Image: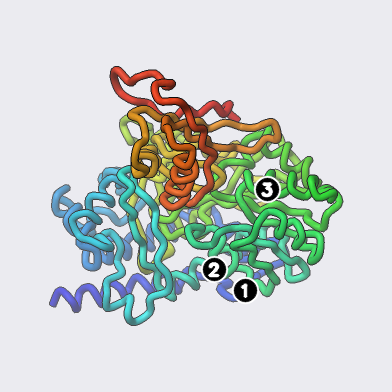
Amino acid sequence: MAQDRAEQTRSTWLTVLEKYQRDADAPGSQDYWSPSLDCASRDELIAIQNAKLAALTPFLYENSAFYRRRFDRLGLTPTDIKTIDDLAKWPVVDKSEMMADVQAEPPYGTYTTHDDALWAKRGWMIFSSSGSTGIPRPFRYSQIDRDLWSWANARALHSFGIRPSDSMFICAGYGPHVFAWGVQYALAKMGVACIPGGGMTGEARAGIVDRFKPTVLTCTPSYALHLGRVMEARGSDPRRSSVRTLLVGGEPAAGIASTRERLEELWNARLVEFYGCTEVSPHCGGYSCPASDTDKNAVTSHLMEDIQIWELVDADSKQRVDEGQRGLTVCTSLNSESSPQLRFLVGDYATCTTAPCDCGRTHMRAVGAFAGRSDDLINLRGIKMYPVQLEEAVRSVPGIGDEYEIVIATDDKGLDIMTARIEHTDPQAAERVARAIQTRCELRCDVELLTPGTLPKTEFKAKRVRDTRSTR
């Protein structure tokens, strides 16, 4: 009987998703991929959200043990949350709850609606997002998710003016980068050629730009800086290259004037960005407003409200804040078979408005785009890690002194770098620590070897990460 209810709610949910996937395979107009959605009235957007939400809550209850337990613990039933006004009854879900769920129910946890049977039937790809204890939170996505994901990203890419006449160079490691995978599948839907740039050195990638002349470069903001400097060192001028659009993700950029200006000046190209996260179906949730191209003092990012419900909450109380007030982003995913999370705390600071936009889109905008996370997450060149992961890496090398320090800084070229300052008597220890950090955190780190006793002793709570980057 329970299995019948699970299958029935899944069928209803998928039917609702299909109903509102308009212009699924091709753009509906020159300016808007899905004009009836991108330019829907506020009332219609709310109606779509409510229709999806009414189908989502019973689907979660019947197909996710995590959500069933949470409903029961809160004394709520799925019918208690049928509209966006009802969402306030549901406390936000944070990543610590998911990490505890994974620990209790390894290896996948129960917070998604994708079980072993569904994975065997139409599994697509697993992505993981690390928790503050270093425990990965895996998310199994289905072939249906891939299709929904491609459609959502195509809508955003189309808004940037990217067309089949373009070619995109994707500079990413692919493994941990949901951003790169999502962009590549969207390009396939759009008929836009791409050059995958995973596993290449900066020199090799600079050579690709010179030889094959892509019109769009996709990477993190930090890597766009790095690649530009590599080209300069080779005697090439990135300003004279074929690149005319920088599509970035993974770390803030568009809303940070100094970073955006530095990148646009370096490449003589406009900068646009995606916003999203792995947990709430990691396609684009927010994207740079086209109107920002003509007014750099009014940079905003649209949030795709027909496929996600976005809220801002107070950092302490986690209660909704009024429109125009700064808060932390919370997302309810309405566009996924496998990971339609209900009020997940994404946790980036933003200020939003629903005021009319010059680009014609009616969806909520984040004024000034998005700022950093509220927790202790470290974001370096698009790679995200926590201090405990760095500690695990440093202490895995025998003979390391009791004290160590991680220093994050911006060098004179504007690139963010990380240095581990360690105490050891063996010069080879520096190489071993660098290798351990790269293995656990998937990025290269400089290591400074110090004489034992150099670093001050910790007398209270250790704060081993020192971020000297200025607020950008």
Position of 116 with respect to 174 (left or right) is: left
Q: CA distance from mark 1 to mark 3?
A: 23 Å
Q: Quadrant of residue 355?
A: top right
State the residue at coordinates (22%, 57%): 66
Left of 77 or right of it: where is 445? right
Residue 124, percent across and down?
A: 42, 74
Give the amino acid at mark 2.
Answer: Ser
* Residue type, mark 1 in image: Ala
Query: Which of labels 1 and 3 is toward the front?
Result: 3
Q: Which mark is residue 188?
A: 1
Q: Which residue, given by chain and number where applicable, does mark 3 sit on?
A: 224
**Would residue 362 be visible to someone looking at this image?**
no
Q: CA distance from mark 3 to mark 2?
A: 24 Å
Q: Earlier in the sequence, mark 2 or mark 1?
A: 2
Q: Secondary structure at mark 1?
A: helix
* Location of residue 408 in the rendering, given as x and y in whole percent from the top left corner: 52, 32
What residue is drawn where x is 75% and y is 62%? Answer: 208
The residue beneath circle 2 is: 150
Q: Earlier in the sequence, mark 3 or mark 2?
A: 2
The front one of 426 and 293 is 426
Q: Are marks 2 and 1 in contact (CB under 8 Å)?
A: yes
Snapshot quadrant of residue 137? bottom left
Closest to the observer, 396 or 367:
396
Q: Where does residue 317 sit, x and y in percent of width and height?
A: 31, 31
- Proximity of marks 3 and 2: CB atoms separated by less than 8 Å: no
